[in-house]
Amino acid sequence: MVDVASLIIAVILFVVLSPGLLLQIPGEERPVEFTNNRTSISSIIVHAIVFALVFYLLQLAFGVHGGTK
């Protein structure tokens, strides 16, 4: 059976870290803006890096392994 924990973690992080949904780092007028529903190239890059780091750390913390055994 395929381990779905990796998929669940990725989906939750994607929703939480979508730029402009809950917060935007860096914001257009301030360093952090909340629920502005706008994005910029720099915020997309920052959120992608944060997503990758948090995803990797959560997979290490929970011992989740992607792929087949």
Image: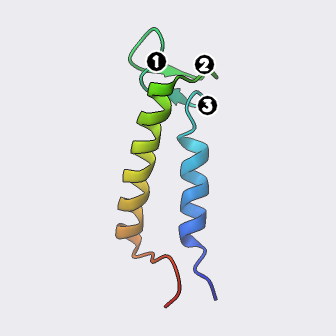
Say whether marks 2 and 1 touch (CB < 8 Å): yes
Q: Amino acid at mark 2?
A: Asn
Local SS, label 3: loop
Mark 1: few, some, or many residues within 10 Å (few <14, many ≥20)? some
Q: Residue furthest front?
A: 41
Dot 3 or dot 1, earlier in sequence: 3
Image vertical order of residue 51 relative to residue 28, above or below = below
Kindly identify the residue that appears in the image at 41 percent across and 34 percent down.
46
Q: Position of residue 29 (x, y in %)?
A: 46, 8
Kindly identify the residue that appears in the image at 44 percent across and 57 percent down.
55
Image vertical order of residue 34 relative to residue 47, above or below = above
In this rendering, position of residue 39 left or right of residue 62: right
Residue that label 2 marks: 36
Q: Position of residue 12 (x, y in %)?
A: 59, 53
Residue that label 1 marks: 27
Q: Nearer the viewer, residue 37 or 39?
A: 39
Q: Amino acid at mark 1?
A: Gly
Distance in Å between CA atoms under marks 2 and 3: 7 Å
Q: Position of residue 43 (x, y in %)?
A: 47, 28
Q: Amino acid at mark 3?
A: Leu
Local SS, label 1: loop
User: Which mark identifies residue 21?
Assistant: 3
Distance in Å between CA atoms under marks 3 and 1: 12 Å
Kindly identify the residue that appears in the image at 52 percent across and 28 percent down.
23
